[in-house]
Each structure stands twice: as C-alpha cells, then as structure tokens.
C-alpha cells in the first residue's frame, strides 16, 4: 500500500495567500450552503423537540474529536517541521505512524458508544415525551450516527496533512461539497415528507464519509510525488514523540470542546429542549464572523510554525499585527449582524422565531470574545506554546458549567443565562493569552 502527495513550493509565502483566497471562496460557498442546509433541516422536522434532539446530538458528536489524543494536531505540527527541514523520510514515518495509531481509538469509540447507548434513558435525559419518540428508537439513532461519525473522524486525519502542506483550501472545498450533496438529498426527503432522525443522520454524516474516502484516494493515489503513506513506514520510536505533543493538544481540545459545546445540553436539561433552536440559530448566524476569521487563521498556524522553525520572529510580529486589524473590522460586522439578527433569522427559517434582545446582545459579546481568543490561540499553537492555553481554557471550562447553572437557577435571564456564563468563563483566556503573547514578542 503506497500513497503519495505533492510538496512543491511549500516554503514560500505564496501558498499562504493562495490558501486564504481558496479557503475564502470555498468557505463563502460553505457558509451559504450551510445556511441553506440548516434552514432545510429546520423545515425537515415538524417538531421543535425533535429538532432540539438533533441539534444536541450533533453538538455532542463534536466532542469525539478529542479521542484522537491530539494526534491530528500533533501530526500537523511535526509534519510541518519535518517538511521545513526537507526530511521526507521522517515526514513519511509521522504520517504512517499516526494513521495506524488512530485505528485503535476509532474502534474503541464505536464499541463504547454502541454499548453505553443501551444503558442511557434518552427520554429522561432530553426531557421529552415518550409519545413523540421512543427510547429504543433513540438508542438505534445514537448507535448509527456514532458509527458513521467514527468513520468520518478517522478519515479526517488527511486534514492535518493538507494543513501542513499549505493545501487547507481543499478541506474547505470538501466541506462545501458535503453541504451541497446533503442539501440535495435532504430536500428530496423534504418533498417526499420523510421526517426521520436516523435517515437524516445517515445522509448528513454518511455523505461526509463518502467524500472523505474519495478525497483521501485522490490526494494520496493520484498526486504521486513526494510524501508517502505506507505500513512499512510505521515507526514505534515516534509514538512517544507524537503523544507528547498530542496529549497537550488533547487536554486543550477537550477543554475547548466542553466549553463551547455544552450549552445545548444545559439548555435542554434546565430550560427546555425547544429553546435550543432559537439559541442555535442566533449562534450560527453570528458565527459567520468567526468563520471569516478562521479563513485567515487556517494557514497562519502553519506559517507561524514555519517562521519559528526558520527563526524568523519579525515575520511573526507582522502577521500578528495584520490579524489584529482584521479582528477590528470583524467586530463591526458582528455588531451590525446582531442588530439585523431577528429579521435575518425569520427570513432564513421561514418562521416567526422570537429572539430576546438580551440574548442577541450577549451573543454579540460572546462572538467578539470568541474571535479575540481564537487569534491568540492560533498564534500560540504555531509557537508551540500549549501549556499556557491548557491552563487558561482549563479554568474557563471548569467554571463554565456551574456558573451557567447558577445563573439559570438564580436569575430570570432564562436561555440568556447560559451564554452569560460562557462569557464570564472566557474572561480568563481573553485576558491572560494576550498578555502572554505580547510579552513573548517584547522579549
């Protein structure tokens, strides 16, 4: 088994610009198709409680990304360094070793999810009437989506390689293609009046699995040039090296995932699953600005790491200054979009959904904080400064859930209390990470 990919021009700044442009085009299409897809899924379900279950399970699935023990991000950093040093053999060994190691957590996830699903009372967990949907059906639904997402999780390793070789735009292209295919099939089901959670899960996640398989074959099989993935390159001595960096990314990933993906569950449990819909629609609308920032940040991580490897600190300072300018412009975009949010959401979903003003204001504040933290997180990832991030996001994660629950129970804010708790928790990384980064550059 022998696969190869092209590495030409990986050391010049040009690929960064091409990546930002390519990602921008595909991500713009991705945002458009994602908005259409979310609106279509909302119409697909005739019950807000069922839609709330779908949104909650979808957010829980993202927690699975930490089960790679940080090996994806570790591969990205290690591969970027080895490519910068023109060490093709070491690059091949990192790729092959990571792919083989990732088989183990993928199998563990599938087995654990399918077994544990049978011991959970999903009806009680979601606080939903069993006349609407049965617990047995939800068990089958959870097993199906977790199996499919596990396959998607494993195949996503190719993303780390694409990042390292300045081909991040392919990732955005893949995600856009998945959205387009999903829109087509779900629209057909909508016209046929087929409203089924399991069918939706099979299409929604299964499409991604198929596209990732084709992408992996295309990247490694067709582009036969420099890097190689082969079982013969598996190297036991690299396992410790991969895990040393990977475990730090694991803790960091876990903290961030819990911090940003528990809100749906808290709303379902303490307020009502029907409230998840309005919260998520507003969240996804304002996250357009976070996505735009992410377009710029995606190749910057790799660029910062290469500049560090080449001992080019001045270039990193210039990059950082440009990111702060972009952030300032996006803050204006968040405020304008927040002001227009009720109108946009009603047109988007085709329903008269009432969004509380206080929730809109707090979501605007949260989005600004989120973007601010993302800039410093991305820079520090490229600088290999993970410990300070683990400390900050660890504190934020530990305080977020109890603080949100407290605000829900002892204030009249309702669903707005959840996002307020997250804002207070984000104060830690929002203050400490910038101070740390500024001091690093001053030194």
Image (cartoon, rainbow, N blue to C red):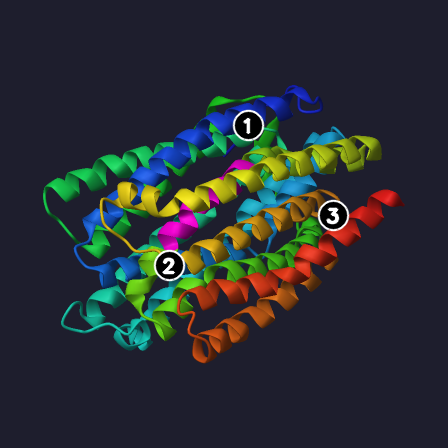
Horizontal side of residue 71 vs 324, given as left or right: left
- How many C-alpha atoms fall within 10 Å of the one at disc 3: few (<14), some, or many (≥20)? some
Quadrant housing residue 129: bottom left
Q: Could you tell me which quadrant the C terminus lies in?
A: top right
Distance from Cα at disc 2 to Cα at disc 3: 41 Å
Where is residue 136, by image quadrant? bottom left
- The reply to whether callout 2 and callout 3 are in contact (CB within 8 Å) is no
List the single residue furthest toward the right: 443
Judging from the image, what secondary structure is the residue with disc 1 in? strand
| Element carrying mark 2 | loop
175 or 80, which lies in front? 175
Give the alpha-carbon distance from disc 1 to disc 2, as whole Å: 53 Å
Tell me the chief SS of the magenta region: helix
- Number of dots carrying numbers: 3
* Above or below for 250 versus 124: above
Residue found 43% across the figure and 45% down from its top: 339
Q: Which residues are magenta?
A: 280-293
Q: Residue furthest left?
A: 192
Residue carrying label 1: 4
400 vs 319, left or right, is left
Q: Give the residue pinned by disc 3.
A: 384
N-terminal label among 1 and 2: 1
Rendered location of residue 431, percent (x, y): 71, 57
Whether residue 181 is visible to the viewer of this picture, yes or no, is yes
């Amino acid at each position: 088994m022998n696969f190869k990919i092209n590495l030409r021009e990986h050391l010049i700044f040009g690929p960064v610009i091409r990546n930002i442009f390519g990602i921008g085009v595909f991500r713009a299409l991705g945002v458009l198709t994602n908005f259409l897809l979310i609106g279509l899924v909302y119409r697909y379900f005739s019950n807000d409680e069922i839609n709330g279950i779908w949104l909650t399970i979808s957010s829980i699935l993202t927690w699975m990304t930490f089960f790679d023990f940080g090996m994806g991000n570790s591969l990205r950093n290690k591969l970027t360094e080895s490519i910068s040093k023109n060490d093709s053999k070491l690059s091949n060994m990192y790729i092959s070793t990571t792919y083989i190691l990732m088989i183990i957590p993928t199998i563990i996830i599938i087995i654990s999810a399918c077994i544990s699903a049978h011991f959970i009372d999903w009806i009680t967990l979601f606080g939903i009437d069993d006349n609407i949907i049965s617990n047995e059906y939800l068990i089958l639904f959870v097993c199906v989506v977790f199996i499919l997402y596990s396959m998607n999780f494993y195949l996503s390793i190719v993303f780390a390689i694409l990042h390292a070789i300045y081909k991040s735009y392919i990732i955005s292209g893949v995600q856009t293609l998945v959205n387009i295919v999903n829109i087509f099939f779900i629209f057909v089901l909508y016209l046929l009046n087929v409203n089924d959670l399991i069918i939706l899960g099979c299409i929604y996640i299964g499409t991604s699995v198929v596209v990732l398989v084709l992408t992996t074959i295309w990247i490694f099989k067709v582009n036969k040039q420099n890097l190689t993935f082969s079982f013969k390159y598996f190297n036991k001595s690299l396992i410790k090296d991969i895990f040393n960096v990977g475990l730090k990314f694991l803790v960091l990933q876990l903290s961030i995932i819990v911090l940003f993906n528990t809100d749906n569950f808290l709303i379902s449990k303490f307020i009502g699953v029907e409230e998840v819909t309005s919260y998520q629609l507003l969240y996804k609308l304002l996250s357009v600005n976070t996505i735009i920032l992410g377009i710029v940040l995606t190749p910057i991580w790799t660029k910062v790491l290469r500049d560090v490897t080449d001992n080019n600190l001045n270039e990193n300072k210039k990059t950082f200054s440009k990111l702060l300018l972009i952030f300032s412009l996006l803050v204006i975009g968040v405020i304008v979009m927040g002001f227009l949010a009720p109108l946009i959401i009603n047109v988007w979903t085709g329903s008269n959904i009432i969004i509380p003003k206080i929730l809109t204001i707090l979501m605007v504040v949260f989005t600004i904080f989120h973007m601010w933290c993302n800039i410093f997180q991305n820079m520090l990832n490229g600088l290999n400064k993970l410990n300070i991030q683990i400390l900050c996001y660890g504190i934020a994660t530990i305080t977020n859930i109890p603080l949100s629950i407290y605000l829900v129970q002892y204030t009249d804010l309702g669903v707005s209390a959840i996002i307020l708790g997250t804002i207070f928790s984000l104060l830690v990384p929002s203050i400490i990470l910038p101070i740390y980064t500024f001091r690093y550059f001053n030194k």
